Image: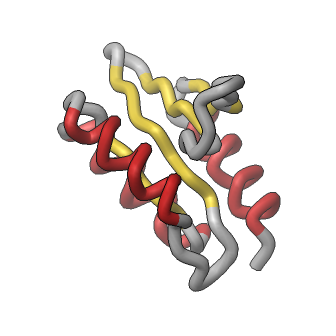
Amino acid sequence: MKEKYIEQKLILAVKAKGGLALKFVSPGFYGVPDRLVLLPNALIAFVELKRKGEKLRPLQLKRKNQLKALGFSVYCIDDVKEIGGILDEIRTT
């Protein structure tokens, strides 16, 4: 399963929940997650998309830990089956 396919499914699922899945780019600050997920009621999470079985690179893991230390939710999705559960988790935290 290609990363782009999973990303498109995430965008559609977030939109169906009334939210936005914005492409997150931070020039000069590498390793940030692919998408910033914004859901109703000011819910925010960062999402990194990977092909099935791929893991975060060391710099991506460092950024994930930095964002989590600031109190943000950060997820890594490598299967479309994870999307619904993660969106539910974001909505309940």
Image position, residue 78 (x, y; %): 58, 71
Q: How many marks?
A: 0
Residue at left 53%, top 74%? Answer: 55
Residue at x 20%, y 31% (from the top left corner): 71
Closest to the observer, 76 or 64: 64
The relative height of residue 27 versus residue 32 in the rendered view (above or below) is: above
Considering the image in quadrants, where does the N terminus appear?
bottom right
Outermost residue, top side: 42
Q: Is residue 70 above or below residue 69?
A: above
Q: Is residue 85 left or right of residue 72?
A: right
Corner quadrant of residue 92: top left
Residue 16 in which image quadrant:
top right
Can you say whether 91 is above or below 87 in the image? above
Residue 87: image location, x then y, percent: 41, 47
> Who is closer to the viewer here, 33 or 6?
33
x and y, in percent, of residue 59 in the image: 51, 54
Name of the residue lying farthest toward the front: 28
- In the visual, does 68 lie left or right of 84? left
Relative to residue 31, is residue 75 drawn left or right? left
Rendering coords of residue 46 (x, y %): 46, 39
Question: Which image quarter is the C terminus in?
Answer: top left
- Residue at (63, 81) in percent of width and height: 52
User: Looking at the image, which residue is at 48% across and 63% down?
Assistant: 58
